[in-house]
Amino acid sequence: MSQGEYIAAEKVESVYGKSSCVGQIWVYGNSFQSFLLAVVVPNMDSTIAFLKEQSLWTVKSGEELHTAFQRICTKEKKSVKAWVASKLKEQETSLKGFEKVVMPVTPLSPKKSMQPLDLEEEGISTSCTKPII
């Protein structure tokens, strides 16, 4: 980090990964910035439960689950992203200030919604190449 702090990405990923909303997470920081970023792929089952609680889950007749999920998450992107951010905040009690993610990025585009992080396609490297369960 820019102030010389050492961040163990595995620790931060592990702490945030305990949240039921996390399907997969990747944490990134560098010495030119004073904050961490995270890419969070939400857990599909937890996200559907949240959408149902909010009365936002509506599956069309004959629609496949993944298709419905992508459609609804795209439509309700702000709600899902806010929910993920709030669930991550609940996990931060054991993290130091500089270990906390400033702004999680939740990819919810129709093309990539809920797809596992692909190290080759996304061009990222991570200590956590398997989904956190």
Image (cartoon, grey):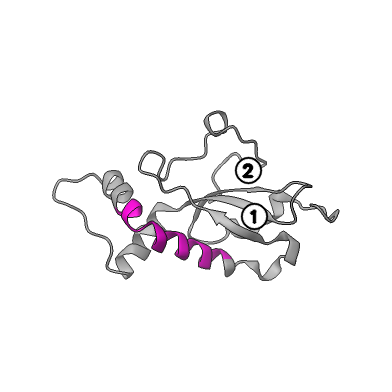
Q: Residues within 10 Å of mark 2 (few under 14, many from 20)?
A: some
Tag 2's secondary structure? Answer: loop
Q: Quadrant of residue 17?
A: bottom right
Q: Nearer the viewer, residue 1 or 47?
A: 1
Q: Nearer the viewer, residue 10 or 2?
A: 2
Say what amino acid the circle numbered 1 marks.
Answer: Ser
* Residue positioned 65% across, 36% down in the render: 125
Mark drawn on residue 97: none
Q: Is residue 59 left or right of residue 99?
A: left
Main SS class of the magenta portion in the image: helix
Residue occupying image coordinates x 48% and y 59%: 21
In the rendered image, which residue does mark 2 sit on? 128
Expressed as whole percent of the image width and height from the top left, the position of residue 122 reads 54, 34
- As drawn, is 105 to the left or to the right of 111? right
Residue type pointed to by label 2: Cys
The one of 82 and 20 positioned closer to us in this rendering: 82
The stretch in magenta equals: 72-88
**Vertically, is 23 above or below 102?**
above
Q: Position of residue 44 (x, y in %)?
A: 40, 52
* Residue count near mark 1 (Cα–Cα under 10 Å), binned few <14, some 14–19, many ≥20: some
- Residue corresponding to mark 1: 14
Q: Given the current orientation, which residue lies at the most extreme front position?
A: 32
Is residue 39 rendered magenta in the image? no
Q: Quadrant of residue 66?
A: top left
How far is disc 1 from disc 2 in space, using C-alphas?
Answer: 9 Å
Question: Residue 117: x percent and y percent?
Answer: 52, 39
Label 1 with label 2: CB-CB less than 8 Å: no
Q: Residue at x 42, y 45 (%)?
A: 114
